[in-house]
Amino acid sequence: MEWKIFENYLGAEAGVRMKSTYGWFNHGNGNNLSGFNALPGGAREDPDGFLGLEHKAEFWSNTTFNGRAVWTRVLFYDNNAVNRLSNTFKSGSSITCVKD
């Protein structure tokens, strides 16, 4: 997925427009106006294991960072932004599939 294009298209509150209308911790649901329907599935964090269920949705991008990590896009229950974070290749995130 072309994350920057999608984020720019959705505007300032892209995160809330991507988040599902249910399942997020502490009323952190979105409005899903984009139809993306991101669910808070958490992620596998190296070396701590699986964390963040109900608190975040994390997605791989196809862009590496310093050749040792990958950029991810993360939605958190407590804000409406789309966050860009680097993560190691040993971690695990959700993926998106786009039909051409």
Image (tube, rainbow, N blue to C red):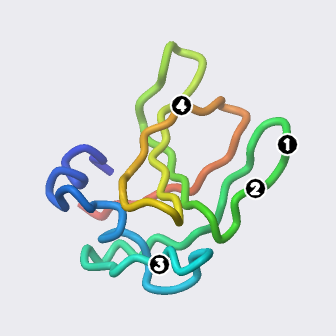
Residue 29 bears which disc, if any? 3
Disc 4/disc 3 C-alpha distance (Å): 24 Å
Report if the CB atoms under discs 1 and 2 are less than 8 Å apart.
Answer: yes
- Label 1 residue SS: loop
Decide which of 94, 43 is in the foreground and name it.
43
Between circles 2 and 3, the one closer to the viewer is 3
Which residue: 45% across, 47% down?
A: 73
Q: Amino acid at mark 1?
A: Asp
x and y percent of residue 82 in the render? 38, 52
Check disc 2 and report the residue beneath it. Answer: 51
Disc 1/disc 2 C-alpha distance (Å): 8 Å
Residue 64 bears which disc, if any? none
Check disc 1 and report the residue beneath it. Answer: 48
Which quadrant of the view contains residue 25?
A: bottom right
Q: Amino acid at mark 4?
A: Ser
Q: Quadrant of the C terminus?
A: bottom left
